[in-house]
Amino acid sequence: MRYETVIGLEVHVELSTKSKAFCSCKNEFGSEVNTNCCPVCLGYPGALPVLNKKVVEYAVKAGLALNCDISLYSKTDRKNYFYPDLPKAYQISQDDMPICKNGFIEIEVDEEIKKIGITRIHIEEDAGKLLHGAGDEDYSLVDFNRAGVPLIEIVSEPDIRSPEEARLYLEKLKSILEYLEISDCKMQEGSLRCDANISLRPIDEEKFGVKSEIKNMNSMKSLERALEFEVKRQTEILLQGEEVAPETRRWDDAKSITIAMRAKDKTYDYRNFPEADLVPIVLEPEWIKEIKTNLPELPDFKRNRFVKQYGIPKYDASVLTLSKDLSVFFERCAKDYKNPKAVSNWVMGEVLRILKEREQEISNIKFPPEYLRELIDLIDEGLLNSSAAKLVFEEMFDTGKEPKTLLDKLGLKQISDEDAIGELVNEVLANNQESVEAYKNGKSNALKYLVGQAMKISKGKANPKMINSMLLERLED
Amino acid sequence: MDKGYIEYICSLAKLEYDEENSDRIIEKIKAFDVYAEKLADIDTNDIKPLVNVNETINVMREDAVMPSLERNIILENAPEKLYGCIKVSKIIE
């Protein structure tokens, strides 16, 4: 029997407003514990919430960018459950009347565009943070700074058919949210959190199989790995003629497995009812239109523009526009430059390589993008060969200094002086008679060896093109 | 609805209760139940769902930060505290 994978994702996004969703406490990650709290977010009796207008604006922005219908009339509800990180014993959320519905995201799978439906986007508040000691203490500590931080929850349709598609969907979603500048989308810090519902069904079967809900995936990679593990686990169960248990499972990144947390046999009743302390949200079509008009350029649009404007391959444009910061970096480098593909190669190659190696973000890079452009200019002018350029680049990355200054400091300036190259060539020819003979007898590879020798003597500083042509000239004489 | 259930509810709500009065409490809570069940008999087919009792809409505030409470004031309300946090029974799923 062959099975088809069915995945739906629920994504929670912390909005980067200045203040919280329903009170004026600071919305900030990393503050000292319990310093951004007030009677509203601590759930003191009699305290009244008031909705932050920016939260509505950001949710509408997200809805428009994700092709949703924006509800002209929506409301908030109380979702009741008991947990120490939830001081009111209910979460203000939106139940049956979410602010956005019926959207979609386009992803590219095997060079084909696939639409993944978005069921809904709703506004809600985050809970506090529980801190558990590493040891065997019999207590937990609560920090309420996060309580009341605004979230939007984005729920996809079960349209995703593989772990890879799930990653592509989340990458695209993250990218769009970053472009909108409504969240910093840091999975490691929890400002973008993803839960996945996954089930298998026999191919050609319409009815969905029993699903597991997977939590605790802290990166794109762990989302894909957790789902791959789950496909394997559920396939094995089904092939043995058994049934998958409906349960919530936690991804353990270190062990690379999912672990059962709790059964999901009964649906928990959250006793949702309208939040009487808050009034309905009624939106003016004009306001929505204004937000739509002012939406920034989004990733797909920018990718197509890069292809057209800079003549770079679609693949390059996709990589460069997935991150907003990277796209801005590229564009500042490539603007009015005769060879944007060279810039693209540098950004996709050396820049991404060093960022990954040093575990840094493009936004924290020390040198301005224009310096990379200067570096490429130096190569074009023949002042630097490509291997020396990589050394200059690393130094530029570490110090933030201008490439010209570094070139002199590192003594890497390329030798392009004809007399100097001529001397080098003479020396190489005199000391490598065997190779010279070999070349004359038709072994064209010998030329490469001779160029290599000249580069070695010059400690990598000689202009390889000039050496090549001068050697050829002498050998053909 | 029995004594055990009342005890459980009281422990969740951090209420003290007098065991001698448990029969009386059970009876009172049962009366809520009976009342709530009555609501199910009402025909609500032609009634629009009520979202809010008053007709006000769009009460919102600008996104501006105001001072929060001093931490020591927050912690005064906590039965137990540690390292600036509120201390609770260990909860790990």
Image (cartoon, coloured by chain):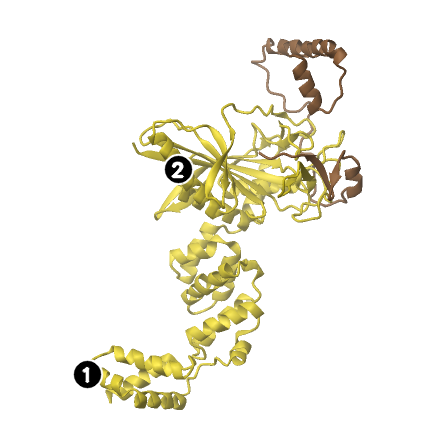
Chain colours: A yellow, B brown
Which mark, by number, is residue A441? Answer: 1
Which mark, by number, is residue B46? Answer: none
Which residue reaches farthest front?
A: A136
Image location (x, y in percent) of residue B40: 60, 11
Q: Nearer the viewer, residue A55 or A406?
A: A406
Residue drawn where x is 44% and y is 58% of the image: A306
Residue drawn where x is 80% and y is 37% of the image: B76
Give the total number of marks visible in the rendering: 2
Q: Are marks 2 and 1 on the same chain?
A: yes
Residue drawn where x is 55% and y is 73% of the image: A402
Q: Nearer the viewer, residue A39 or A163?
A: A163
Q: Quadrant of the N terminus of chain A?
A: top left
As shown in the figure, which amino acid type bears the numbered disc 1?
Answer: Asn
Q: Quadrant of the C terminus of chain A?
A: bottom left
Question: Which residue matches tag 2?
Answer: A231
Q: Is residue A22 above or below residue A185?
A: above
